[in-house]
Amino acid sequence: MPQTMARPLLDILGARWRVGVAAAAVAWDTATGLAGFALSDGTLAIAHPVWPGAPTVRPAAGGGVEVVPGTAAAPPAARVKAHANTCVSVAADPGGGFLTGGTDGRVMQVQVDGTVRALAHQGGPISMVVAGPGRWRAFALRDSVHRVGGAADQIKLPGPVSALALSPDGSQLAIGQPGGVTIWAGGDAPRVLAATGHPCGLQWSTDGTFLACFLEDGTLRAWHWPTTVASDIPAGSVAALCPVAGGGFAAGLAGRVVYWAPPAPQTYACGVPNQSAVTRLGGHPSRRLVAAGYANGAVVLCRPSDTGFMLLRGAGEGAVRALRFSPSGEYLAIGTDGGEIALLTLPDALFRDRGERR
């Protein structure tokens, strides 16, 4: 994937919104195609990547594709007040809209029309929320995880929760805790996988056969599921992890993205080194493509074991803190702690013409 455009692709096929506060996370509503950004002022910013007069691409006469410039600016992003303080986490709600968690101790259901409903009110900050298949709605509160909705339940952990990851089929929730990972299937007896320190960045592989994390000592660890046989590889300073379509994981090691397919004993470099550290990674849902966001605000697109890259967003406006592909893979949501959110269109033809196949 060579860098073929002098301008970042976001400047050609995307839209930006200045929201004035930091973006912490982002999720996509599957029914409407809207992106919801959790913001530090307690609001959820909601925007659509397509609007009347948006730029697009079409087949070029001589082969390949060409950009059709936009004829109208993107409409303003909607802002919904969800929390009294900071909105720290957001997930796509299985019932439509979004599930948010905030430092005010509330878990809220936010519909795309701006309707807000409280699902839980706790006596402490909600650090993470997760939702998905199996009608899961769960959140982390200090050293406990609570499930809300049809089957209210909770589980106590031996220390602060460091990560949550719902399996692709929604059958179980992986919970990072001091000394390991708890696998919880709602009311059933939990299963514990031992690890050193706090497992961070928990991620299931796209087919659910591996559960991976990075540890405080710089080790990448993956358990083969359901055998729970562990594979370890020394990695160094890991700050981000995401699954790669077709198998394996991408990890951010300082200013470099690497690919690991457990139980392989080595990693492979992706893209090119950056002087700025990787802060977020997002895996395409169906292609072997990884978006990497950096502390200087830049975002690039790369492939496992390939040194080519495509510049999606230039540096500036703070570090990238929110990064997620839409479920279809056609769009990418980006948010920074410098107060900018953005949506980028990634047409299917853009990759077919570069030899990238599903």
Image: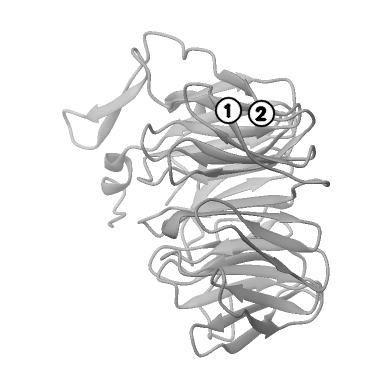
**Circle 1: residue type:** Val
Q: Which residue is mark 1?
A: 116
Which percent across, then down, holds residue 311?
53, 40
Q: Is residue 202 above or below residue 358?
A: below
Residue 295 occupies which quadrant of the picture?
top right
Which percent across, then down, holds residue 23?
69, 34
Residue name at image x 53 percent, y 59 percent: 151
Residue 87 occupies which quadrant of the picture?
top right
Distance between the alpha carbons at the discs numbered 1 and 2:
7 Å
Mark 2 neighbour density, 10 Å: few (under 14) some (14–19) many (20 or more): many
Which percent across, then down, holds residue 310?
48, 44
**Looking at the image, which is closer to me, 106 or 248?**
106
Judge whether residue 203 can be spotted in this image. yes
Q: Which residue is mark 2?
A: 82
Residue 144 occupies which quadrant of the picture?
bottom right
Compared across the picture, whether 1 is left or right of 43 comes to left
Residue name at image x 34 percent, y 12 percent: 53
Query: Could you tell me which quadrant the C terminus lies in?
Result: bottom left
SS of the residue under disc 1:
strand
SS of the residue under disc 2:
loop
Mark 1 neighbour density, 10 Å: few (under 14) some (14–19) many (20 or more): some
- Mark 1 and mark 2 lie on one chain; the one further toward the N terminus is 2
Q: Is residue 227 above or below residue 318?
A: below
